[in-house]
Image: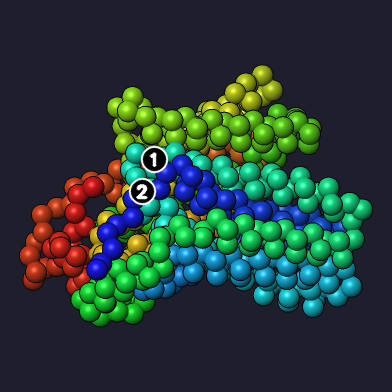
């Protein structure tokens, strides 16, 4: 007897998946923040070394579609979540060991760190992709915005708890203590993942039976193989448009990360402590935007103001307005209300981020059947590539603008304006994702050889 579909997850199930995201955040914050500081401050190594390693872990995540395809073929996401978390934990411990080794042997430690951060990238990609697919498929449309907010906030909670607790146990600092603390955090994160994910996909036999039957039909129709699956997904207009949207919007989102505090110090004269507090103001705005959209998206009253796709566009436009305002404010420093402007920027970013993630969850099963993992992986790869490039390109743009314009205010204003334009382009791209497709021209002129299940080739259906 073929088992019926599992009921949508309630708040307890969403919280359990959020715990996996918390575990991800716990290991990531040590490898991308704590180890960064140790290399530069304690070991006096060039700042570009940890920067290159962090960029490497983003670059490796371009492989996300492959890991998503693996979970599609198997019909279950749990093994990929657990396996990815295991690789992330091993990579985290290796990264701390490599950092400790750099104290006595820089070259050997660096080579080991390259391996470690490669494993970290693979682990985050495999675990994170399947986790989002599982969340998307098991959460009802009504709770998608709230679920996206919950798992995002729980990842931030992982950052905070780990940074605070690990920071306490790292003093007095020693390389051996660094490795020990990282190993304990990685072990706890892996155990939390095992407990949280247990049984959330339902009875193993039932899921495998249903998944095997569906996959057999899908692969018989498509010919199977990762390249064919990726080609199928890329041929879907909505999936392709959303990937381009994710890249541009996340490029604009991440390009501001490394230049906001230098802007506050250079143009507004804020001290290091004051500029750090400014980052807290921005994160407070992000949190407020996320919670606001979660409440509106999960309530009958709030949904009257538009869909998640509508809020994605509005969040992009609001972010563009905030960045333009920030660019203009530099010309009126120090009298401009900088903190209020930065809070508005964070609020707009929070609205955009949750709406985009919620939209991603809604679109993941639109198109060719049994390609949810590849689809989510494609979008995750676009995000990882944008994050890897964003921070670096933002700093390069500021340096270049300062040389050409010979004015810090003009330099920062030009970069913020450029980011605002990218958000406006992203808003247009977001509109195009759900725009009705033109009438199908017929089989002779169809550019896509891969018809979606139950639909004519070249069309992914309405949303």
> In the image, 170: left or right of 424?
right
Q: Residue furthest front?
A: 1
Identify residue for label 2: 8
- 429 vs 146: above or below: below
Q: Residue at x 77, y 47 (%)?
A: 165
Q: Is residue 183 visible?
A: yes
Pick whichever of labels 2 and 1 is earlier in the sequence: 2
Instruction: Name the residue nearer the viewer: 140 or 293.
Output: 140
Within 10 Å of the Cα at label 1, are there few (<14), some (14-19), or many (20+) other Cα atoms?
many
- Name the foreground residue: 455 vs 459: 455
Q: Residue furthest right?
A: 172
Circles 2 and 1, Cβ within 8 Å, touching? The answer is: yes
Q: Is residue 341 above or below residue 118?
A: above
Residue 36: give x, y in percent of width and height: 75, 57
Q: Which residue is mark 1?
A: 143
Q: What residue sits 31% from the left and 36% below the top?
A: 307
Q: Quadrant of residue 48?
A: bottom right
Specify how the rendered protein is coloured. Answer: rainbow
| Tag in front: 2 or 1 | 2
Dot 2: what SS?
loop
**Image check: 20 left or right of 75?**
right
Residue 252, given in percent of the width and then of the height, sits at: 50, 46
Percent from the top left, x then y, of residue 293? 44, 33
Residue farthest top in this picture: 335
In the picture, residue 84 is in which quadrant? bottom right
């Amino acid at each position: 007897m073929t088992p019926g579909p599992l009921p949508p997850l309630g708040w307890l199930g969403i919280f359990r998946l959020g715990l996996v995201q918390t575990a991800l955040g716990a290991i990531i914050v040590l490898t991308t923040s704590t180890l960064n500081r140790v290399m530069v401050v304690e070991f006096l190594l060039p700042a570009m070394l940890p920067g290159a390693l962090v960029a490497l872990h983003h670059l490796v995540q371009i492989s996300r579609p492959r890991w998503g395809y693996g979970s599609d073929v198997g019909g279950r996401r749990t093994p990929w979540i657990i396996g990815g978390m295991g690789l992330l934990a091993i990579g985290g411990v290796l990264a701390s060991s490599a950092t400790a080794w750099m104290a006595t042997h820089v070259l050997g430690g660096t080579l080991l760190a390259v391996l470690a951060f490669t494993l970290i990238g693979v682990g985050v990609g495999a675990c994170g992709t399947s986790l989002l697919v599982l969340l998307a498929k098991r959460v009802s449309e009504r709770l998608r915005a709230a679920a996206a907010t919950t798992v995002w906030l729980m990842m931030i909670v992982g950052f905070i708890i780990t940074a605070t607790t690990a920071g306490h146990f790292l003093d007095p600092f020693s390389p051996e203590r660094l490795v020990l603390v990282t190993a304990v955090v990685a072990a706890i994160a892996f155990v939390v993942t095992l407990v949280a994910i247990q049984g959330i996909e339902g009875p193993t036999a039932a899921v495998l039976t249903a998944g095997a039957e569906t996959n057999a039909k899908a692969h018989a129709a498509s010919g199977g193989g990762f390249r064919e699956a990726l080609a199928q997904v890329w041929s879907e207009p909505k999936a392709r448009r959303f990937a381009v949207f994710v890249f541009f919007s996340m490029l604009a989102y991440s390009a501001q990360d490394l230049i906001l505090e230098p802007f506050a110090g250079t143009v507004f004269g804020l001290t290091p402590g004051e500029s750090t507090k400014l980052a807290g103001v921005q994160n407070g705005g992000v949190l407020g935007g996320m919670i606001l959209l979660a409440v509106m998206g999960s309530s009958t009253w709030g949904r009257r103001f538009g869909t998640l796709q509508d809020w994605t566009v509005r969040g992009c436009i609001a972010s563009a307005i905030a960045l333009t305002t920030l660019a203009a404010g530099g010309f009126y420093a120090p009298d401009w209300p900088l903190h209020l402007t930065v809070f508005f920027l964070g609020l707009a970013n929070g609205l955009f981020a949750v709406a985009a993630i919620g939209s991603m969850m809604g679109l993941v099963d639109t198109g060719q059947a049994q390609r949810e993992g590849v689809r989510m992986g494609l979008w995750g790869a676009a995000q990882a590539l944008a994050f890897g490039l964003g921070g670096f390109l933002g700093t390069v743009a500021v340096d270049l603008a300062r040389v050409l314009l010979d004015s810090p205010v003009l330099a920062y204003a030009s970069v913020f304006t450029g980011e605002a334009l990218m958000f406006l382009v992203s808003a247009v791209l977001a509109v195009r994702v759900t725009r009705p497709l033109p009438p199908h021209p017929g089989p002779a002129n169809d550019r896509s050889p891969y018809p979606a299940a139950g639909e004519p080739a070249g069309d992914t259906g309405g949303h």
